Amino acid sequence: MTKNEDIDIKYMRLALDEAHKALERDEVPIGAVIVSKGRVIGRGHNLTETLTDVTAHAEMQAITASAATLGGKYLTDCTLYVTVEPCLMCAGALAWSQISRIVYGASDDKRGYHTQCAAPFHPKTTVTAGVLAEECGKLMTDFFKKKRPIKK
């Protein structure tokens, strides 16, 4: 494993911690952290039910916290770690933020940005997919199995 892979796993584990906070609130368990120069500057987890706000996704919470930490709206030289592929709404916000890098765990074949749009991010943004994908995906799968039990 390379040093960069180790770093990605380290921060994805922090995003998973955020996802578990969402799970504790009976929210869809998605978590996010944003890192700048080796320091977490923002974090978030889904709060759509808690806030009765469809825009209160983990990524949006992390973007807002990071912008407040930096004192500006642009997240250049920052990396987002998120447990599930961003939706199109979050992808748009990330594009506007000019974030440099996005790392996500599990793909979202129903609502992920790739199902709607090929390249929604800032042209300089790089994307790394599949970091701890199995663990991130299992959290989502288990959550929805409990929400939608199989009828016999």
Image (cartoon, rainbow, N blue to C red):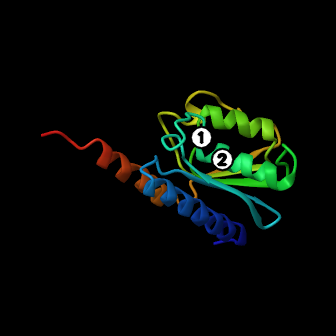
User: At x 82% / y 48%, what residue is drawn?
Assistant: 75
Q: Is residue 65 left or right of residue 51?
A: right
Q: Is residue 9 above or below residue 130?
A: below
Q: Give the residue number, with chain letter if any, for mark 2.
A: 61
User: At x 49% / y 53%, what residue is drawn?
Assistant: 22
The amino acid at mark 2 is Gln
Question: Can you give x and y, in whole percent of width and height, for residue 50 in the image?
Answer: 50, 44
Q: Is residue 2 above or below residue 64?
A: below
Question: Can you give x and y, in whole percent of width and height, for residue 76 in the image?
Answer: 85, 49
Total labels drawn:
2
Question: Can you give x and y, in whole percent of width and height, for residue 99 in the image?
Answer: 79, 46
Q: Is residue 134 left or right of residue 67?
A: left
Residue 99: which numbered mark, if any?
A: none
The amino acid at mark 1 is Ala
Quadrant of the snapshot with the N terminus: bottom right
User: At x 82% / y 41%, what residue is drawn?
Assistant: 98
Q: Nearer the viewer, residue 133 or 60?
A: 60
Q: Residues within 10 Å of mark 1 (few under 14, many from 20)?
A: some
Q: Earlier in the sequence, mark 1 or mark 2?
A: 1
Q: Residues within 10 Å of mark 2 (few under 14, many from 20)?
A: many
Q: Nearer the viewer, residue 70 or 129?
A: 70
Q: Nearer the viewer, residue 129 or 43?
A: 43
Q: Secondary structure at mark 1?
A: loop
Cα–Cα span, label 1 and label 2: 6 Å
Q: Is the C-beta separation of discs 1 and 2 under 8 Å?
A: yes
Find residue 10 and report its image quarter: bottom right
Residue 56: which numbered mark, if any?
A: 1
User: At x 60% / y 47%, what residue is drawn?
Assistant: 58
Q: Secondary structure at mark 2?
A: helix
**Residue positioned most to the front:** 51
**Residue positioned most to the top:** 116
